[in-house]
Image: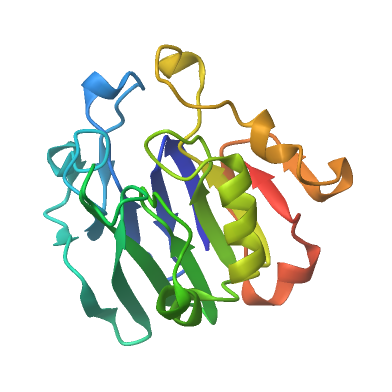
């Protein structure tokens, strides 16, 4: 499996069999360069402009934007759980979906724009993923400290932080990545490149935190 961080909360997940899945595609107003990606499926956590630009994904993909369980192929399944985009049970920003992809003997979790710590039901459903894509920037989502608490609850093998301040969104009221990385030892962090190649057999060789 190859996981490429396009930017913000958008990832391209490519499976060995050729299936391509895009998460939370952003539009041009987000500030990041827009890449036209071909995909078989698009996961949309919620309908904000920086997460639901399905029009930028080519190939007539299947769009998954509601809670439920989905089968993309025989051994490729998606579970979408409801979560909240804020700490007031959705009163400020509504709901977001939390996705779990089961494929190639691994479980990959993408937490969308989670705005509060996962509850007991969500933790039970999503705990111990092989790879966790987690927002860390705060304000619109959980912040760095809450993200670290979420990591402790879910116990992932590999963490990929997302949704933090970069040069493309300097004016956004969110934190930079360093605020999250300070919770980890430098030896557990690997930075560089825009993709992570991972298999069920090499998870033990992967970094605890992969910045891609």
Furthest residue in direction bottom, as rendered? 74
* Residue 49 vertical placement versus 79 (above, below): above
Q: Residue at x 22, y 20 (%)?
A: 29
**Is the image coloured rainbow, by chain, by secondary structure, or in one colour?**
rainbow
- Which quadrant of the rendered structure holds the C terminus? top right
> Residue 150: x, y in percent?
57, 60
Q: Of 105 and 78, which appears nearest the observer?
A: 78
Q: Residue at x 16, y 66 (%)?
A: 66
Q: In the rendered image, is residue 156 in sight?
A: no
Q: Is residue 207 left or right of residue 68?
A: right
Q: Residue at x 51, y 54 (%)?
A: 133
> Residue 195: x, y in percent?
56, 44
Q: In the rendered image, is residue 64 in sight?
A: yes
Q: Is residue 155 left or right of residue 115?
A: right
> Residue 175: x, y in percent?
54, 27
Q: Residue at x 85, y 41 (%)?
A: 186
Count of numbered badges drawn on the protein: 0
Please identify the quarter of the rendering in which residue 75 is found: bottom left
Q: Is residue 208 left or right of residue 169?
A: right
Q: Is residue 169 left or right of residue 94?
A: right
* Residue 154 vertical placement versus 121 (above, below): above
Q: Of 120 and 40, which appears nearest the observer?
A: 120
> Residue 142: x, y in percent?
47, 45
Please identify the quarter of the rendering in which residue 64 is found: bottom left
* Residue 30 vertical placement versus 147 (above, below): above
């Amino acid at each position: 499996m190859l996981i490429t961080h396009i930017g913000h909360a958008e990832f391209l997940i490519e499976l060995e069999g050729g299936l391509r899945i895009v998460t939370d595609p952003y539009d041009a107003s987000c500030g990041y360069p827009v890449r036209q990606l071909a995909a078989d499926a698009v996961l949309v956590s919620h309908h904000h402009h920086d997460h639901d630009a399905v029009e930028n994904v080519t190939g007539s993909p299947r769009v998954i934007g509601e809670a439920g369980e989905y089968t993309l192929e025989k051994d490729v399944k998606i579970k979408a759980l409801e979560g909240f985009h804020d700490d007031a049970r959705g009163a400020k920003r509504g709901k977001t979906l939390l996705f779990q992809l089961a494929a190639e003997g691994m479980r990959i979790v993408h937490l969308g724009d989670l705005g509060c710590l996962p509850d007991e039901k969500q933790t039970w459903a999503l705990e111990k993923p092989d790879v966790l894509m987690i927002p860390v920037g705060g304000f619109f989502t959980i912040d760095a400290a809450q993200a670290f608490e979420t990591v402790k609850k879910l116990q992932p093998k590999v963490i990929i932080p997302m949704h933090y301040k970069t040069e493309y969104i300097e004016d956004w009221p969110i934190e930079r990545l360093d605020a999250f990385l300070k919770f980890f030892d430098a030896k557990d962090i690997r930075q560089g490149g825009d993709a992570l190649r991972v298999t069920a057999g090499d998870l033990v060789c992967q970094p605890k935190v992969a910045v891609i």
